[in-house]
Amino acid sequence: MKQADFLQMIMPFKDKLYRLAKRLLVSSEEAEDATQEVLLRLWSKKNKVGTYSNVEAFAMTMTKNYCLDKLKSKQSGNLKLVHSNYKDEHTSLQREVELKDSVSFVHEIMEELPEQQKIIIQLRDVEQYDFDEIAKVVNMNPTAIRVALSRARKYIRQELIKKHNYGVS
Amino acid sequence: MELANIEKLVEKYFEAETSVQEEQKLHAYFSQQNVAPHLEEYKPMFQHFSNLREEQFTRNVPLQPRKNYLKWISVAAVFVLTTGLFVNKWHKQRQVDKAFEDFKMTMSLVSESFNTGASHINHLAQFEETTNKIFITENN
């Protein structure tokens, strides 16, 4: 596979990889690193990649696993401290400026979701994958995905309503 | 689209029973300006999802440098090593051969001079012959 063919192939889904990585890793720098790593791994396997039936699902799975590994190693190391410092500063700034901005509040709620639900929400509501495609990436059966998705959506709604009422009273 | 339909879809949406097409309808509905007041609270959610969909990966990925240089370096190293060993062995063999030739030459030189020395010993036989002659004649 030539470089041009490869670029052509990853074109439609490289943004999706990045967005999934960013949802999980939060920082855009890290998400870019993760995406680059995944793409380079794909490139190093370029001869095999052509034979896969669904390269996009394969790449998404790779990204998911890579990010979860990253998060796991971050939790065990002291990097987490650095990261949460960064996050805290960020949100407190944001909170001051955009306290009333519900859209950014949705973002905060989404960050509270467990990883699995984050992935599913990302794949379904942002990338609009159907359940079969999601099943391939997260390795769950469609019913379990439906349950997790419903739970995640309801959680966002519940938190959003809480915030709404708080704003009113 | 009429409101009742949207309400039904929203309900189904939270049970995760909507299809991708139905969710696209919801996204379309919530992205417009006039949303029914009692559905207004869901608007940020859909708006946020739409915002997230806009993010793009802009970094250029350096694809070439990952070529397997290591493989070729190791192949070259093996080649150099084997030729080195071979040349070394061949050189040693040549040294041994040369030493052997030298030794052979020295030895043949030695044997030659030994032979010339030995040829003079033949004259000693003359003495014996003569002595014999003398003693034989005396005895008679």
Image (cartoon, coloured by chain):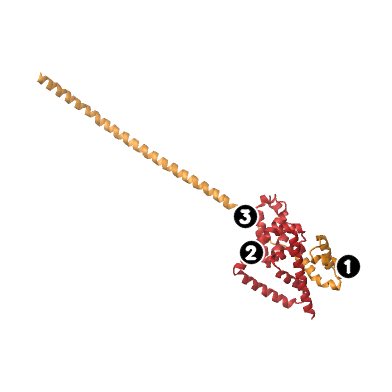
Q: Name the residue under label 1.
A: B4
User: Dot 1: what SS?
Assistant: helix
For this rendering, which residue is in front, A122 or A16? Answer: A122
Circle 3 Cα neighbour tier, 10 Å, few/some/many (<14 / 14–19 / ≥20): few
- Distance of mark 2 from mark 1, alpha carbons? 45 Å
Q: What is the three-letter code of the residue carrying label 3?
A: Arg
Dots 1, 3 in contact, CB < 8 A: no
Q: In this view, does A23 lie to the left or right of A78?
A: right
Q: What is the three-letter code of the residue carrying label 1?
A: Ala
On the question of residue A33 being in view, the answer is no
Query: Which image quarter holds the C terminus of chain A?
Result: bottom right
Q: Position of residue A80 (x, y in %)?
A: 62, 70
Q: Name the residue under label 2.
A: A70
- Distance of mark 2 from mark 3, alpha carbons? 22 Å
Circle 2 Cα neighbour tier, 10 Å, few/some/many (<14 / 14–19 / ≥20): some
The image quarter containing residue A36 is bottom right
- Distance of mark 1 from mark 3, alpha carbons? 57 Å
Q: What is the three-letter code of the residue carrying label 2?
A: Lys
Q: Position of residue B82 (x, y in %)?
A: 49, 45
Tell me the residue at 67%/63% (across/down): A32
Q: Where is residue B48 in the image (x, y as percent from the top left)?
A: 77, 68
User: Dot 3: what SS?
Assistant: helix
Colour that chain A carries in the picture: red
